[in-house]
Image: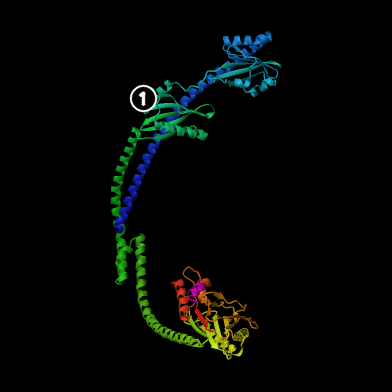
Amino acid sequence: MTLSLRLLATVLTSVGLAIVGVAIVMGLLARDALIDQAEGRARLIAGLIAAEANRAETFLHEVDAASLLQIEAQAIAIGRLADASRPDELARRFAEITAASTIDDIWLLDGSGRPIARALDGIGLVEDAEFDEAGIDRRELAPLLAGRRFSVSLRSTLQDDFNRTLRYAGVRLRPDRFVLVGRIEAGGDEPLPAAGLVEALADQEGIEAIWVVDDRLQVTAAAVGGARETALPEAGRRLAGRALDATSIDRASDSAAFSTIGEDALHVAAPILGRWNIATGLVVMRLPRDRLDSLLVDVTTLGAIAAALAFAIGSMIAIVAARHIVRPVTALTRGAEEMDRGSFDPASLDAVARQKDELGNLARVFRTMAREVQNREQHLEGLVRDRTADLRRKNEQLEAARQRVDEELRIARALQGAILPRPIPEHDAYIGHALMTPAQELGGDFYDCFRLPDGRLGVVMADVSGKGVPAAFFMAISRTVTRAAAQEHSAAGRCLHDVNEAICAQNPHDLFVTLFYGILDPASGRFDYANAGHNAPFVIGVDGEIRELPPTGGIVVGIMPGLDYAERSTSLVPGDTLFLYTDGISEAMNGDGDAFEEERLKRVLAQASAAPLPVMVDNVTEAVEAFVGDAPQSDDITCLVVRYLG
């Protein structure tokens, strides 16, 4: 897509998105305004109903207070009557009063609060008078009995099938005489406002129906289109339940209204707040969606018209701007292409460079840069020609040097292989086989087999620290010194002592070598050995049992002079095989960093305990290669096998 098309698409997309976004926001704001208006009307109606309920509640409280004063006056009069009557006549007189008046229950108590006489609904109850059975909490009489108050009032529920509520007034006549008078109260909750008010409010424009529900979601008043109706739809019931739960959890939201939009109507619920700002009920309103849907359609239509106009105007502006912007950019692009082909003429950008804007600055900078690049290219081409010729000569010299080094390394590797005994000395009492595979061109491992002056067989396995050329030279020195010491000393420990002394005396680079030296007596099968920090060899028995030669505790050769090396001996029976190796086998690593280890080596040796020695060596090397896989060889692999024949 060209730059002009991208500019045009960017402008049109931005304008279109902005117009559509504004239209959506306007529609949402209009919808929210209608919902807020509906919620406000619901709060207003709830306030009117709450005010009427509060006035009714105030009237009921005043009536209740007057009733309480009347009961107290009746209690005082009954007390005076009790003082003027004989004790045996009290129950009868009280029964006559409860039967012929509005008083339903009379108690006469002594100074400790024990009932003296009682009458209930025209029946005298002297012996059966118990506070618990009457549902009276004795603790509420404590201020009266203690003399702290002249009168008390309380409510109690009679324990009968009618579950009636009695209002009591207690009066202290004298310190040893109290009267408690009770009258049944009218049952039921406080009535919610009359349905006439709800019907009048439901006649307002834009309201389809109004329901007034109590805190149990029971409809107490309702009006639908001016006619009474008690059924609350399911959507309104769910909204009322949610509003009631919210107001009961958070008192700060008691004055808030709740709304929900259905397929055909908008339902709004607002709490009716009584005394102490407690919700005693809810007003649920249903409003038609016609106005809301009409407003959304109008806003969407206006948004579409505005978007079309904006698109048209934006398209014309974008086309003009794109042509003005793209023209110098095209000239710069053409100049860059000519610069790449080497045919650029700086004068072709003079028209663009005369502009006083950013593109003009860019053209001037590009033109100056192009001249400098052309001059530098000419200079660099000359330098490249000179450097190329010089590099060619250097490469030829390096290649000749590399070939010379490779040839010298090849010869050194051949010489290193030549100094190791390829054929093991032949004898009727033993046979042997050996293998060394260096990790680099030259290795640091070495083995050796030689006959001693007394006819015994000397066996050496060693591993020089490091790799490459230094290790190879140190290996040659160590082998030579070991052979010389072995010819002079018949004991393996004394031989290693002299080898350590000689190597420490000519070791400028502080290299060291782990070395195992053993002497096999072909006549008896006795094998004497000393170990200078090397891997312990294995003895593979005729029965396939593999055992490791016990260590002698020797330190590696070349660390410090003056060290002694202990010796140990073992006996070989005909068919036993000695397996000497370096850590290039046991410490061979695979791609996951796991080592081959001695246990895996033992299992491989056990599988070929009676096989020919070359087969045994091949099995070990093949097992190591299979374990390592594609991982590079990390160390020299060397092993020596000697089988005692007896």
Where is residue 423? Give x, y as percent.
48, 87
Magenta span contains residue 115: no
Rendered position, 284 above or below 87: below
Rendered position, 200 above or below 427: above
Q: Could you tell me what secondary structure mostly forms the magenta stretch?
A: helix
The residue type indicated by label 1 comes to Gly
Look at 66% across and 8% down and name the residue there: 89
Q: Residue furthest bottom?
A: 453
Q: Is residue 544 visible?
A: yes
Where is residue 593? Give x, y as percent.
49, 69
Q: Could you tell me which secondary element the residue under label 1 belongs to?
A: loop
Q: Quadrant of the N terminus?
A: bottom left
Colour scheme in use: rainbow
Position of residue 607 in the picture relative to residue 67 (left or right): left
Q: Is residue 154 visible?
A: no
Q: Quadrant of the C terminus?
A: bottom right
Rendered position, 336 above or below 378: above
Q: State which region is magenta.
A: 600-609
Foreground pick, 320 / 496:
496
Q: Residue furthest right?
A: 175
Total residue callouts: 1
The residue tagged 1 is: 225
Foreground pick, 253 / 342:
253
Look at 49% across and 23% down and name the residue there: 53
Position of residue 473 in the picture relative to residue 41 (left or right): right
Where is residue 582? Give x, y as percent.
53, 78
Where is residue 429? Give x, y as percent.
53, 86
